[in-house]
Amino acid sequence: MSGAKLTKIAEALPSTVPFVGPEAAERQRGTAFTARLGANESVYGPSPKVLRAIEAAAPDVWMYGDPESHDLRRALALHHGVEMSEIVCGAGIDGLLNSIVRLHVEPGVSVVTSDGAYPTFNYHVAGYGGTLTKVPFRDDHEDPEALLRAATETGARLIYLSNPDNPMGSHHPAQVIDDMIADLPDGCLLVLDEAYIELAPDGTAPLIDTSNPQVIRMRTFSKAYGMAGMRIGYAIGEAGVIRSFEKVRNHFGIGRLSQQAALAALADTEWLEIVRAEVARARDRIAGIARENGLTPLPSATNFVTIDCGRGAEFAKTVLDALVARGIFIRMPFAEPGNRCIRVSCGTDQDLDRFAAALPPALAEAGSAMNDG
C-alpha cells in the first residue's frame, strides 16, 4: 500500500521551515528563555482596548470570521484614504505573500529579492517552482538599483523589497522608493513589505497610489500593534491586483477574534504612540549596551537593533549561541555581510537588564573559543 505522490516541486524541496521558533528552541534546551528578544514581537502587547474587544468577542468564537473582513477593510480604507476594493486582509504578511506568489509564480518564472532578506518569501517562491535571483545588500541597506537591474536582466515578474528592512533594520526614504517604482520594468510587480512602517521615521512611506498596478503594499498588526499571535495583516493595491486574491486566498483564514482585535487596535492611536516611544527608548538602550561592550549598533527604523560584532560570521554565531545558552533568545542575519551581526528585539527593562548581564560573558566565551580555534 502506498500513499499519494508529492508533486515534483514538493519532492525536491527540503523538509524545513524558514525559522526555528523560540518554543522549539526551548524544548530542545529543556528550559524556558529568560528574555525573548529574537522574534521582533512587541513585548508591550496590544492596546488594553484590544484586550477588551477580544474578551467581548470571545463568546462568538463558535462562528467563523467574516470571510470578506468587511468591517476591518472599511476601517482600513478610511484610515489610508483608499477604497475597500483596494484592500485585502490575510493571515499576516506571510499568508498574503503566499497568495501573491501563488498568483504570479510557476516553474521558470523569475523573482528578485535581496540576499539575506525575509526568508519566508523565498520559501514560497521555491514552493511554486520559481527561479530566485538574489542581490547583495549595499552598506547594510537593500539596494533598489541592483534589484531593478536584476529584474530587468531576468525578466522578473516579482521584486520583493522590505522598507524598513529585516534583518538589518535600515530604511530608505520615500523618495528612493518612489524612484524605484518609477523605474519598474513592464510586467513586474513590486511587493513592498512595510511590516515595520509604523515604527519608522516620518518620510519613510511613499504616498499610497492605488492607481498603479505594479505595486502592492504589505502591512501587519504583528509589530507596532502588538498582535503577532492573532495573525492578521493586509495588502493595499490597485483594485484589479487586489481582486485577484479572491482566486486563491483562504477565505476563512482570519478568525473572528482577530478581526475584532484589529479594529480596536486601529482605532487606538494613543496606544500606538506609547509603543513608538517605548520602542525608541529600548532601541537606545540596546545600542548603549552594544557600545559598552565594544560592539557597533546599526541605526534602526524597526523594533529591533542589529549589532555588528566586528569579527565576522563565525564569531557572531558563537556569541549568539553563548547568549542562547544563558537564556537570551536572539537571532542573527544569515547572509554575508549581515552575518557578522546579531539582532536583538526591543524588550522590557527586565529583558534588557538580562541581555546586558549576559552579553559580556558571552563575548568572553566567544573570544576564547575563537582564540582556541
Image (tube, rainbow, N blue to C red):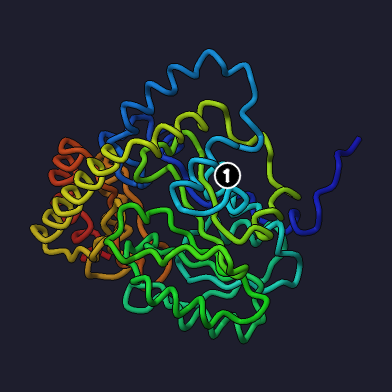
Residue 305, percent from left and from top: 26, 57
**Residue placed furthest toward the top:** 59
Q: Quadrant of the N terminus?
A: top right
Quadrant containing the C terminus in the rendered view: bottom left
Q: Residue at x 65, y 38 (%)?
A: 68
Query: What is the crowding at mark 1: few (fewer than 14 residues within 10 Å), some, or many (at least 20)?
Result: many
Is 96 or 210 nearer to us in this picture?
Answer: 210
Task: State the residue position of label 1.
Answer: 89
**Dot 1: element:** strand
Q: Position of residue 272 (x, y in %)?
A: 29, 42
Q: Is residue 354 left or right of residue 174?
A: left
Q: Residue furthest right?
A: 1
Where, by quadrant of the figure, is residue 86 drawn? bottom right
Q: Quick one: 62 or 267, which is closer to the camera?
A: 267
- In percent of width and height, residue 112 lies at 57, 73
Which residue type does callout 1 highlight?
Cys
